[in-house]
Amino acid sequence: MKKLVCAGEILVEIMAERIGQSFLEPGPLVGPFPSGAPTIFVGQAAALGQPVGLIGAVGEDDFGQLNIDRLRALGADVSAITSHKGHATGTAFVTYLADAARHFVFNIRNSAAGLMAIDDAARHLLADADHFHVMGSSLFSDKATDVVLAATAAVKAKGGTVSFDPNVRREILQVSGMRAALDKVLAETDVFLPSGDELFLFSSAGDEKGAVDDLLGRGISCVVLKKGADGAAYHDRQGAVALPAFPVEEIDPTGAGDCFGAAFVSMWLRGAAPVDALRVANACGALAVTRKGPMEGIHRLANVEALILNAGAHA
């Protein structure tokens, strides 16, 4: 199977235990959980049996080891993750608001995550890569952006493909140079995976069809629009297909979009029909929200297929 590579932030997530809890006063927390959008993506792809590796950096601490151990257990290639003594692994503290929105306090730019680089281990990993995946959240500093763009260029130069999930949070979009970096990645993208209104960050069209047509006209092979509880839709120049979400009890939405993206890209790399890739992606996204913690809802392919079969039996 084709080798999939990603680069970006590795961190732990520490979460408020109660809905409506604020960080302006002491309160119960749960965690640490291994996290980071590219980390979740790589973990889910590995769980599905896709050959996949991550370029990143952690501190020489328990939080870094927690992430490396989880990725290794799922089957990911961790050879290009570097550990740095004297630097702390990145962190994200999360509170949940009553309207289901989330508030994040990040320490990524100034953590060990900011030290990721294209070193010998990363070059070796990229030499075997057929596809590179970009998370918009990984463009969190000039150095991180340089790594992502260099990896993208290396894979494209040898005829590989690129997928791109904007994954842009309000806190990150304000970073200087973020917009220009997003546009550079989009220009190299084959598979575009926006969530909801992220579609309109890259098009001035006023409706979904107009924005999709605009993006496909720029050379993107397909647009896969994630709609959360409303399912997802696939668009290419030949047509479109949409599927509803699988009904599940939501415990924690963090990481669901990353799991969806990992599943779709993995199946797309295997040559699956769009409707089949979309179905597996929807199932992975659904399973992801059933556990508290961004990587706790990652499942192996057998469990994903079981959810699909069970849903079909009750349709």
Image: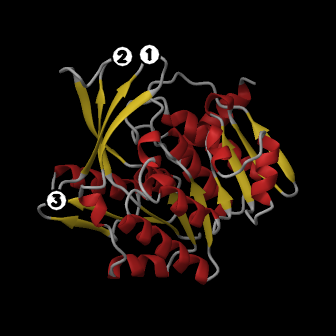
The percent coordinates of residue 18 (x first, y second) are 32, 17
The secondary element bearing badge 2 is classed as loop
Q: Nearer the viewer, residue 64 or 117?
A: 117
The amino acid beneath tag 2 is Gly
The secondary element bearing badge 1 is classed as loop
> Which mark is first along the chain, 3 or 1?
3
The secondary element bearing badge 3 is classed as loop
Specify few, some or many for label 2: CA neighbours under 10 Å numbering under 14, 14-19, or 20 or more: some
- Quarter location, residue 295: top left
The answer to whether mark 3 and mark 2 are in CB contact below 8 A is no
The amino acid beneath tag 3 is His
Q: CA distance from mark 1 to mark 2?
A: 5 Å
Residue occupied by mark 1: 98
The percent coordinates of residue 305 (x first, y second) are 62, 42
> Which mark is first along the chain, 2 or 3?
2
The amino acid beneath tag 1 is Ala
* 108 to 184, vertically: above or below: above
Q: Residue furthest right?
A: 238
Q: Residue furthest front?
A: 176
Residue occupied by mark 2: 20
Colouring scheme applied when the structure was drawn: secondary structure
Residue occupied by mark 3: 87
The percent coordinates of residue 70 (x first, y second) are 32, 51
Specify few, some or many for label 1: CA neighbours under 10 Å numbering under 14, 14-19, or 20 or more: few
The reply to whether residue 77 is in sight is no
Q: Nearer the viewer, residue 150 or 312?
A: 150
